[in-house]
Amino acid sequence: MNDMTKPRLYNEYDAPHTDLREFLKRVEAAGELLRMPGVDWNLEMGTLAEIVNQRRSDTGAPAILFEDIPGYPKGFRVLSGATNSMKRLAITMGFPVPGHSLDAVRSYRDRMQTHEPIPPRVVKHGPVLENVLRDDQVNLLKFPVPFLHELDGGRYIGTDDLVIMRDPEQGWVNGATYRVMVQDEKRVNIWMSPGKHGRQIREKYFSQGKPCPVLISCGHDPLLFLAGGNELRFGLSEYDYAGGHRGQPFEVVLSELHGLPMPAHAEIVLEGELIDGETAPEGPFGEFTGYYAGGRSDQPVIRVRRIYHRNDPILTMATPMRPPSDFSYSKCVMKAGMIWDEVERAGLSGVKGVWCHEAGGARMLNVIAIKQAYAGHSKQAGMAAATCQSGSYLGRLVVVVDDDIDPTDLFDVMWSMCTRCDPAEDIDIIRKMWSGPLDPRIPRGTSWNSRAVIDACRPFEMLNSFPPVARASAALRSKVEAKYRDILARL
């Protein structure tokens, strides 16, 4: 096979990107990068991320690379929205560039048919070790940490981050995205919702009377952010899951203090320990639900004892806000693919599409389309989507639609709800489901909510008698469009 016919693994590339910097070169070559010099870390970065992403086209907004940041060395940069478009998500995951959002979800589903976790490979050296700051040298504010929203409680170095911890009982490594607030030059604290894997691991250390070792990677391959922001099964490391998607192991180096694995090509990594009983106020913070949910509370502090960083480091940034945000599109694709995968693994047949809507923060409004095969099929689909691991946290509404409905099209979904759902017969409520403090609707201190499962399918017993849809057939529409193509082109 010659070079001209050799199949491409990552669109026009033969291999996954090595690191964030190679990823940015590919993104810029695809016309998907907006460079913005001279932007201040104080509110301007967060506000520009909001403006750019809420003005976006159907194909998504560009990634933003903030450069020449006032008050910081010229090479220090901040990146927003690494994966938040169809094309950049395809570059990240090694998928074909989709023409429709469901194509991206199907690519994920196709991948999962053969996906096998690939553990990381330990190496002795990596670019992340170009600079190592120890103890008294530690200064978190040497980096242009953004103050994102006007009512935030402080500057957040961890938003598009990977918090790396090792389970003290089972030995597996968890890497998840949790918000990390800077307290001062040498201290941060992390907010973790009850039930999250990192919080479970933290409590295991505390129950043993031990500090909890932790790394915080604050700039890395965007694939790790996609893995860290979703509910994987307990015991599956995000390194392994992401490695399986790229088809190659991530390279990691072991940290000096605790021997925890950090991405060898990471931009910035912090190391320290969470100490039980040593707390500081954290929050409020503008969150993905679109509210300053979670409030302000005392959270365990990390005294940062090591900072590892590359020369001219790039801090990665996510800006939760009233959706859409600079990460909500990619979150919807990943979440939809994971729910689809779990529902099918549970034995449900006939799924034709799943979409998690940005209006619901990729969690609170999920739609599953099925081709009905038996009575109760649609109800089973809705219950499965509402209760599976990927769909359970902070959910609100699950809508089941027939296979003639595009689950990504809110108008289509609402039409189906209005015409095929009888409220008394087709809406079920599930009570005391997994939620958390980021849910703006539940009382403070409550950790559960309820779900509505809305069956917006035609009743199975009426499939043959339900009134036909009033619209032109595909053949007639195509014929008329062809005849009047020139006139229609003026629209």
Image (tube, helix red, strand yellow):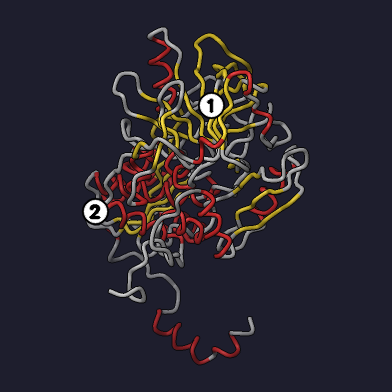
Give the answer, above or below, for where 383 lies relative to 62. Answer: above
Q: Residue at x 30, y 51 (%)?
A: 112
Locate residue 182 relative to residue 38 in the image: left or right.
left
Q: Which mark is residue 167?
A: none
Could you tell me residue 374's position as x and y percent? 22, 54
Depth order, front residue of 443/347: 347
Indicate the quadrant where residue 285 lies. Answer: top right
Could you tell me residue 270's position as x and y percent? 54, 28
Give the answer, above or below, for where 388 lies relative to 460. Answer: above
Q: Kindly state the secondary structure of the residue where label 1 is placed.
A: loop
C-alpha span from label 2 to label 1: 35 Å
Q: Which residue is mark 1?
A: 437
Total numbered labels placed on residues in the image: 2
Query: At label 1, which amino acid type do we have?
Result: Pro
Q: Quadrant of the N terminus?
A: bottom left
Could you tell me residue 434's position as x and y percent? 42, 29
Q: Residues within 10 Å of mark 2 (few under 14, many from 20)?
A: some
Give the answer, above or below, for where 477 lies relative to 333. Answer: below
Depth order, front residue of 395/45: 45
Q: Residue at x 28, y 50 (%)?
A: 115
Disc 2 vs disc 1: Cβ atoms closer than 8 Å?
no
Query: At label 2, which amino acid type do we have?
Result: Ser
Q: Kindly state the secondary structure of the residue where label 2 is placed.
A: loop
Could you tell me residue 66's position as x and y percent? 68, 48
Locate residue 214 relative to residue 291 in the image: left or right.
left
Indicate the quadrant where residue 10 lies. Answer: bottom left
Depth order, front residue of 312/457: 312
Locate residue 463 relative to residue 366 in the image: left or right.
left
Q: Residues within 10 Å of mark 1 (few under 14, many from 20)?
A: many
Q: Which residue is mark 2?
A: 349
Q: Earlier in the sequence, mark 2 or mark 1?
A: 2
